[in-house]
DNA sequence: CAATAAATAAATCACTCTTATTTAGTTATT
DNA sequence: AATAACTAAATAAGAGTGATTTATTTATTG
């Protein structure tokens, strides 16, 4: 089975025609996407949902089952007629590797077809160094792949990298020597990893990858349109339209940090100057508190006291402003806020953001639902791993990555 | 020939499967869209562009020609091999009707397959009244349709309406009695017009329709992503992503008037409070100038003097802010500004907006090209007429209107 | 046993692709 | 100037693929 070649892809800028193999590939992806979304489905139900004939669905699903992508469950009895056979995603059907490169640490994970991590490696550092990261990946990959069975190894679909764009611009904030960070300017991590892998490699902005993870693995994964904010060392985000991640012309849509917001002391600032963990770090230093636990114990900020509350208020105000502006451009139904922070802090941030939105002038605006992300700090690595999943198995027309 | 049934449409929320007739319909739309975009194309070129075989294109284009949608030109000689036959859109291939309902006037136009108006009617009024507009449409339609030949009458593909959403909320601004405007609340113009037409009727927000006109008939019609501002009595706009108009969940995406921008005297306002012709009207009244020529001679504002310059500066500042916010969400390559104002005013507005953007903090942002719209005040009526054109003949997957 | 729903095999239909042929010109050679 | 070689466009015929339609089988309820 192929499952390659989109039915209609905006290859470069060019619209392609569609033929039978593209049609079948599309229908196969459609079936897989629907089964994933509903966890379990019987064939007749899929026929009804897609409008395709029962026979077509029968053929397609038999093939997907033969390929080991779907597994059949116990027949459902107790209703009139022949029992129906529920089919679901085979967790062992495919494996995906995700690499997150951050300012303070890197993560490497392997997930199964359901998105469940089956292996992982972590590395912390003072600042990211190309060679060290490449060595970490090389070693971790070798170990983790070896730990998989032979059959599973052949089912690795690809590796995705989630990394901030233009890493070299942040030597100041990261606290690294500029010469070190400048090395990133000419270091092509994707190419280097490509060279040591016999499966495809993908690269995406880290916050956009986190958004992809929320789209596919999030709790209410059927949302059609939402905007996603990831508050990390910096702030970034992603946009989902019509159930598809929108990466934009440059692949850098959702560069939300550059949004202008009212400054704390008049004038305007950029969102990144108000909503990021770097801002908290500066506040702590100003308050005479050691900020290093921020990165060492990211799940416990209780020792920071009221500084965190002040930070939450600042972030919420900035986010509220950015959210209202976003919604006036695209009528997002839902806004998701996630980030590398303790759950309690995230929950407080969501509540204060809702309040800050309510305090604004909302005439002509449908107030969106503001919710906490359901994934948390693993979102970026998970999103990285989801890149090959999107590319090979899911309906995500023309948005995530433009065709080569 | 059918040309109906999308290959993959988000019907409601449901993803549909694809079959052969859908595939053919898609390929036919693709061919028509390409010919439209390039004005003239020979078959082999289309085969190369679409990736389809020469034979497939041959069959499809022969059918489109037989249906009268394409016409062949003079064979091109002077090159090795058999001369190629250029094909182009048949101007008489289809006709579309557009109705614009504004705060001060209504327009009804008929355009041909190339978007050229072939008939039009205009009606001015102090405020819009449902019965009067319906009568205007009924009468105008009868006359204009009668003036077409019998063959042309059968080629009318549909009628589109461009109208502000929630007309009834503006009794104050329009200066109409609230009771009158309240009638719109329960008056379903689409249904009423549907009843007197034997072709499909479409309805869209007026500014979004203007954006559609710019997308399909604008000078550089190949733009993939842009945001569009229409400065009319109020302000509105539209969004084009991947070459398709994005209408959003509620069909009201690009409700740009609600965007928060810095207030002229501190705090924040909504964009609509700075960027609309209503604002100019208020300025004129405050300056002791009669504003009525605004609506009576919309092509000549020279008599208003320096008030207009102050207004331009205000609008430019607000727009600049909204543009930077937009671009930080979606990396639009191009921003188009159009509106119901004299060309010279529009040109000045574009220049001042560019300057205002340059004065902002643009770190992390790719400065977009800001350009004047190429259509002007007819954009809304033209956009209305383009609604059935999109629906029947063009590739515009899943964005403009969700399937019934 | 009748009724019903799920599943699918076989036959049919629609569409694109491949291959081979025709057509109409240009370019090179005599 | 006449002729041959070559090339590109266009398309007819046949093959291949995939969805649909029709008919049949299977398993269950009542």
Image (cartoon, coloured by chain):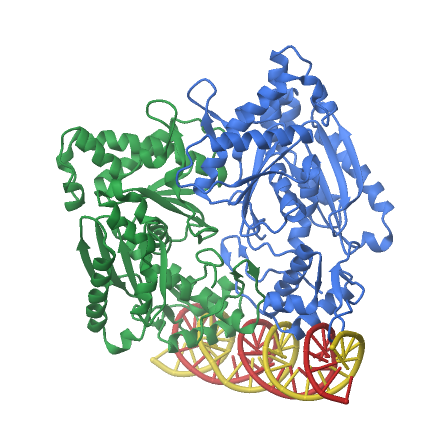
Chain colours: A blue, B green, C red, D yellow
Residue B329 in view (yes/no): yes
Residue B98: x %, y % from top left:
29, 60
Left or right of A391 on screen, residue B238: left
- Which residue is at a point 56% across and 73% down the rendered structure image? B20
Residue B245, percent from left and from top: 43, 53
Q: Quick one: quadrant of the N terminus of chain B?
A: bottom left
Residue B79 vs A194, above or below: the answer is below
Which quadrant of the structure image shows residue B187? bottom left
Left or right of B126, for residue A230: right
**Depth check, front residue: A324 or B36:** A324
Q: Is residue B304 above or below residue A79?
A: above
Query: Vertically, is B327 above or below B62?
Result: above
Residue under the image location 60 percent in, 60 percent down? A6
Count numbered badges in the picture: 0
Residue B332 picture location, percent across and down? 45, 42
Quarter-wise, where is residue D26 in the image? bottom right
Q: Residue at x 77, y 57 (%)?
A: A90
Q: Return the residue nearer the eye: B310 or B221.
A: B310
Dividing the picture into quarters, in which one does residue B151 lie? bottom left
Is A235 placed left or right of A135 in the picture? left
How far across and how far down the image is residue A107, in percent? 74, 35
Q: Residue at x 57, y 51 (%)?
A: A243
Of all residues shown, which one is farthest toward the top? A288
Residue nearest the viewer, comparing A153 with B308 = B308
- B404 and B4: which is toward the camera: B404
The answer to whether residue B39 is visible is no
């Amino acid at each position: 089975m192929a499952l390659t070649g989109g039915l209609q892809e905006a290859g470069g800028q060019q619209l392609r025609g569609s033929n039978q193999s593209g049609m079948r590939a599309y229908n196969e992806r459609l079936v897989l996407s629907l089964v994933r979304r509903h966890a379990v489905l019987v064939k007749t139900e899929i026929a009804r949902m897609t409008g395709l004939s029962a026979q077509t669905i029968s053929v397609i699903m038999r093939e997907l089952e033969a390929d080991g992508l779907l597994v059949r469950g116990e027949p459902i009895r107790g209703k009139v007629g022949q029992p129906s056979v529920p089919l679901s995603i085979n967790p062992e059907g495919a494996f995906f590797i995700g690499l997150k490169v951050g300012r303070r640490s890197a993560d490497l994970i392997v997930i199964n077809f359901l998105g469940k991590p089956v292996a992982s490696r972590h590395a912390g550092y003072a600042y990211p160094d190309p060679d060290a990261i490449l060595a970490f990946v090389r070693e971790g990959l070798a170990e983790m792949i070896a730990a998989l069975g032979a059959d599973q190894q052949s089912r690795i679909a690809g590796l995705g990298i989630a990394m901030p764009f233009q890493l070299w611009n942040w030597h100041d904030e990261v606290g690294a020597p500029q010469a070190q960070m400048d090395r990133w300017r000419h270091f092509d991590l994707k190419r280097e990893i490509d060279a040591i892998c016999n499966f495809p490699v993908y690269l995406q902005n880290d916050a956009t990858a986190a958004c992809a993870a929320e789209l596919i693995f999030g709790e209410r994964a059927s949302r059609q349109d939402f905007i996603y904010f990831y508050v990390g060392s910096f702030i970034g985000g992603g946009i989902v339209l019509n159930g598809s991640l929108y990466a934009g012309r440059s692949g850098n849509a959702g560069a939300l940090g550059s949004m202008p917001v009212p400054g704390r002391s008049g004038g305007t600032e950029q969102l990144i100057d108000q909503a990021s963990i770097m801002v908290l770090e500066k506040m702590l230093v100003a308050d005479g508190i050691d900020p290093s636990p921020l990165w060492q114990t990211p799940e416990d900020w209780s020792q920071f006291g009221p500084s965190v509350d002040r930070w939450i208020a600042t972030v919420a105000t900035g986010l509220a402003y950015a959210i209202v502006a976003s919604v006036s451009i695209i009528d997002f139904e839902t806004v998701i806020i996630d980030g590398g922070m303790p759950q309690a802090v995230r929950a407080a941030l969501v509540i204060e953001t809702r309040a800050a939105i309510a305090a604004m002038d909302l005439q002509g605006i449908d107030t969106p639902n503001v919710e906490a992300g359901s994934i948390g700090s693993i979102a970026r690595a998970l999103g990285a791993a989801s890149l090959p999943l999107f590319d090979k198995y899911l309906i995500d027309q023309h948005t995530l990555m433009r065709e080569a």
